[in-house]
Amino acid sequence: MTKDLIIQNIESLKSHTTINYGIKTKTEAFTEKLFYTLFDSNAPLNESIEELKQLFKEISVVACKKPKGTCDSIWEQYLEKLPAVLENLNRDALYILENDPASNSIEEVYLAYPGFYAIAIYRLSHELYLLDLLLFSRLMSEYAHRITGTDIHAGATIASPFFIDHATGIVIGETAVIEKNVKIYQGVTLGALSVSKDMKNTKRHPTVEKNTCIYANATILGGETIIGKNSIIGGNTWVTKSIPAKSMVTNTTTTEVKIKELK
Ligand SMILES: CC(=O)OC[C@H](N)C(=O)O
């Protein structure tokens, strides 16, 4: 096959989409700039906000699926939400500091906690989701997923304060609801019990009520599953049914220890 023919084939196979990868790199730049603007004490707010506005407009031109012109004022709507988001994030950071014996200062939480980064980008992308900028919100949350290994869908509803420790391998689905004062550890899944396309727009992921702690690698599934308030879900548990308030759920699998015989 000649090079020209190969190019022709590739072109025809690509012709069913209009993907613009620029939107991905722009969203990544926007996310970094937004985090810096909100948390770095030296960030020049006025200038930074102007730069964010420019990037936001470039991204939303491509990401907006609404009729032409409807997305023009969306930046102003997003900007208005930022003080409240920041208030929630400051509460999250304090909660992390107060609950993690390994943390030494609030600066450490803002600068070095992947769980804090994941929650921050979730809260910032959730506002895009609520404004119906679905691709923009997905690109932002996937950026945080890539950096932290924590996959929080921008559609999830998560109250503040919320604490994720170690932030690796966590999955929180689109319709999950998490009330305030919840702590989760690495590997926790709040997922769907089964997956099929016709379940779009239905509640597929669990609700976790307030003051609950979910330890490492617990898997909690199903839209009707409610973890009652003040519960503790132990590590490596598998939960597909609702749990009453004040429950302690443990995995009773035992681990055998044998002493190796020397040969
Ligand atoms: C987190 C999870 O269960 O994902 C499964 C599927 N993507 C859904 O949203 O239902």
Image: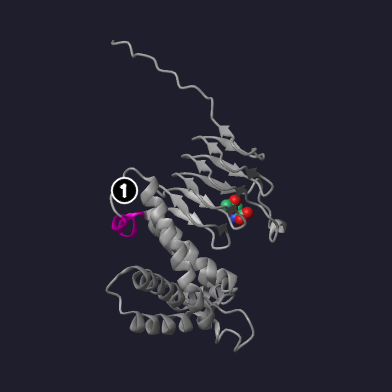
Q: Residue at x 28, y 49 (%)?
A: 104
Q: Is residue 6 in view from this perspective? A: yes
Q: Residue at x 53, y 43 (%)?
A: 212
Spot occupied by residue 208 in the image (x, y as percentages of width and height):
59, 47
Crowding near pointer 1: few (<14 within 10 Å), some, many (20+)?
some
Residue underneath mark 1? 103
**Three-letter amino acid code of the residue under disc 1:** Ser
Q: Is residue 102 left or right of residue 135?
A: left
State the residue in front, 145 or 184.
Answer: 184
Spot occupied by residue 153 in the image (x, y as percentages of width and height):
54, 59
Q: Is mark 1 within 8 Å of ligand 1?
A: no
- For label 1, the SS is loop
State the residue in front, 175 or 85.
Answer: 85
State the residue in front, 146 or 70.
Answer: 70
State the residue in front, 96 or 47.
Answer: 96
Magenta residue check for 134: no
Quarter of the image where the C terminus is located? top left
Spot occupied by residue 18 in the image (x, y as percentages of width and height):
54, 78
Residue at the bottom extreme, as displayed: 69
Q: Is residue 53 above or below residue 146?
A: below
Magenta stretch, residue numbers: 106-113
Q: Is residue 243 above or below residue 195?
A: above
Q: Is residue 259 left or right of residue 191?
A: left
Q: Is residue 146 in view from this perspective? A: no
Q: Main secondary structure of the magenta part?
A: helix
Spot occupied by residue 31 in the image (x, y as percentages of width and height):
41, 70
